[in-house]
């Protein structure tokens, strides 16, 4: 299913070690590897002397200490947060308290849509509901520091409040979890929404940045072409779901078994939510029908 995307899983940075990956851009890996985080969360430091930190990372003492060590003798003026999952934002208050930096992000954690009656949010534990930015960013807003200028690029889909940050001086985009080289992202309702995610991919495909630095794993090279691969990958998955529904009306577990061949069993729940994300989008477009609002336990059929 996914071999159409030219994934790059090379990433050898040990946790706690600072590495310069581009002029004026350093990265630091948190030691929180896993099926959703790859080797762990990557925090970035941009600039010299007066710097910005992108995604302080999880509330992990070793990572917080390593990040503060990395900027010793420098002033952190800006903290930018791509989104409010617990692997990206919870260290923010600690870094802010230690440095006095101003925190920039789209806003607090929120779902892409309200919960349906009787629905529970399976992603509740993954959201950092305590997070509040000092400055709430809108799409296109410019954040300037001493030697760096970021453009906030609203990229909802993985979460409703996801933002990427384009570094104008280097034509680099910090892509958070929206576009990563090692894997596609998780689009899981109610935090995520497939229609938003696809619109955000199309938006990035029109941008000029050739290199992305993501929240997990190494750089995305030839980024606009890679983004097109991500678009086609989701279109292919949508086609597979419709193909399965052509046989007969069915439920999400059956679709997951038909569409995700050889899936890591730890990712079955995420795959089910990803299929739900596609089905929500297909129902909204009038292609697929179900009884009541699209739900994880619903039965789905072609609308035509
Ligand atoms: Zn993440």
Image (tube, rainbow, N blue to C red):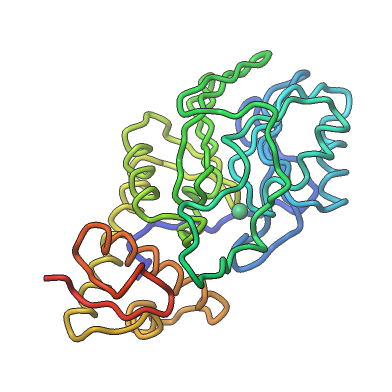
* Image spot of residue 105 (x, y percent): 61, 34
Q: Nearer the viewer, residue 125 or 224?
A: 125
Identify the residue at image location x=60%, y=29%: 136
Identify the residue at image location x=65%, y=33%: 80
- Give the answer, above or below, for where 162 lies relative to 239: above
Split into 4 quadrants, where in the image is the C terminus? bottom left
* Image spot of residue 178 (x, y percent): 48, 48
What is the tally of numbered marks visible in this picture?
0
Find the residue positioned furthest to the left.
Answer: 304
Q: Nearer the viewer, residue 117 or 4?
A: 117
* Image spot of residue 87 (x, y percent): 68, 54
Find the residue positioned furthest to the front.
Answer: 117
* Image spot of residue 95 (x, y percent): 82, 36
Residue 23 location, quadrant: top right
- Give the answer, above or below, for where 29 lies relative to 245: above
- Give the answer, above or below, for where 188 lies relative to 67: below
Identify the residue at image location x=38%, y=43%: 200
Residue 257 location, quadrant: bottom left
Split into 4 quadrants, where in the image is the N terminus? bottom left
Identify the residue at image location x=69%, y=23%: 47
- Give the answer, above or below, for where 157 lies relative to 189: above
Residue 279 location, quadrant: bottom left
Q: Nearer the viewer, residue 209 or 246?
A: 246
On screen, residue 38 versus residue 256, left or right, reads: right
């Amino acid at each position: 299913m996914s071999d159409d995307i030219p994934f790059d899983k090379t990433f050898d940075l040990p946790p706690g070690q600072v590495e310069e990956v581009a002029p004026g851009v350093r990265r630091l890996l948190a030691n929180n590897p896993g099926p959703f985080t790859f080797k762990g969360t990557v925090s970035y430091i941009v600039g010299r002397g007066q710097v910005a930190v992108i995604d302080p990372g999880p509330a992990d003492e070793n990572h917080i200490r390593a990040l503060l060590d990395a900027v010793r003798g420098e002033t952190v003026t800006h903290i930018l947060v791509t989104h409010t999952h617990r692997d990206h934002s919870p260290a923010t208050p600690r870094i802010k308290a230690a440095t006095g930096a101003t925190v920039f992000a789209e806003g607090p954690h929120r779902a892409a849509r309200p919960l349906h009656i009787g629905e529970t949010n399976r992603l509740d534990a993954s959201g950092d509901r305590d997070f509040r930015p000092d400055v709430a960013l809108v799409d296109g807003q410019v954040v300037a520091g001493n030697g760096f200028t970021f453009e906030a690029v609203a990229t909802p889909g993985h979460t409703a409040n996801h933002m990427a940050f384009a570094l104008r001086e280097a034509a680099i985009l910090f892509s958070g979890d929206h576009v990563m080289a090692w894997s596609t992202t998780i689009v899981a309702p109610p935090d995520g929404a497939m229609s938003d995610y696809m619109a955000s991919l199309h938006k990035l495909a029109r941008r000029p940045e050739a290199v992305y630095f993501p929240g997990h794993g190494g750089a995305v090279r030839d980024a606009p072409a890679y983004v097109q691969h991500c678009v086609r990958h989701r279109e292919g998955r949508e086609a597979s779901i419709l193909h399965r529904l052509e046989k007969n009306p069915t439920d999400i577990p059956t679709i997951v078994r038909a569409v995700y061949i050889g899936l890591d069993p730890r990712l079955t729940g995420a795959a089910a939510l990803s299929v739900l994300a596609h089905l929500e989008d297909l129902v909204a477009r009038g292609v697929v029908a179900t009884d009541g609002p699209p739900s994880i336990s619903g039965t789905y059929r072609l609308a035509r």
